[in-house]
Image: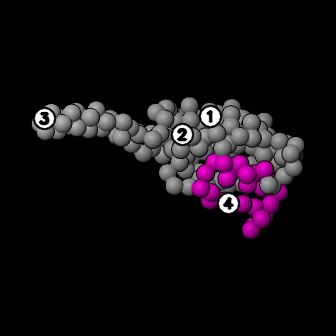
Amino acid sequence: MKKLAIAVALVLLVCSLPVHSKSPCKKQTIEDLVKAVGEAYSAKDLGRLDAYHPYLRKVRIVIRHSLGEGVDEYEVKQLRSFKQGEQWLRSLGTEDFPVRDVRPLLQCKRGVCSYDFDDGIVHRVLYLKKITYGYSNRCPYIKTIYLLDGD
């Protein structure tokens, strides 16, 4: 009877191992992840990305002000989650402004996904400019989101 109990416990342990060894990230291409970031950004709902935990430790958001110079040109924020990033971005404006825009994706190469800015920028629009990324256990993750403020 004792051997049966040990055998059953061993079988249960072996069956439960794959559950614990699963990666916490969603297996996807970097293009799929960047597309999800763009959709969440334009919908003003970056917090929904936290479910997939597409970052290692913190989320970094950098805003470049097109009219800023020197110290006032860049705003950099390190946050614990996309939800906090969304709250910070909302605190920078009103409900309607700045408008968020995501241009067509040019390419993702060598750790950087960049967007097409050939058409110029418009006043009172906050653009998704580029995203830097890396891989951990074959899962893409976001390092930094770069935004361009049309001021």
Does label 4 or label 2 sit earlier along the sequence?
Answer: 2
**Nearest to the observer: residue 5 or residue 95:** 5
Q: Nearer the viewer, mark 2 or mark 1?
A: 2
Label 4 residue SS: strand
Does label 2 or label 1 sit earlier along the sequence?
Answer: 1
Label 3 residue SS: loop
Residue labelled with disc 3: 1
Q: Bounds of the magenta span?
A: 65-90
Residue labelled with disc 2: 52
The answer to whether residue 119 is above or below residue 77 is above
What is the CA distance from the residue labelled 2 to the residue labelled 1? Answer: 11 Å
Q: Residues within 10 Å of mark 1 (few under 14, many from 20)?
A: some
Whether label 2 touches label 1, CB < 8 Å: yes
Label 2 residue SS: helix
Residue 6 part of the magenta segment: no
Q: Nearer the viewer, mark 2 or mark 3?
A: 3
What is the CA distance from the residue labelled 4 to the residue labelled 3? Answer: 64 Å
Does label 4 or label 1 sit earlier along the sequence?
Answer: 1
Residue labelled with disc 4: 76
Horizontal placement of 36 versus 25: left or right? Answer: right
Does label 4 or label 3 sit earlier along the sequence?
Answer: 3
Residue labelled with disc 1: 36
Label 1 residue SS: helix
Q: Residue at x 73, y 52 (%)?
A: 87
Does label 3 or label 1 sit earlier along the sequence?
Answer: 3
Q: Residue at x 21, y 33 (%)?
A: 8
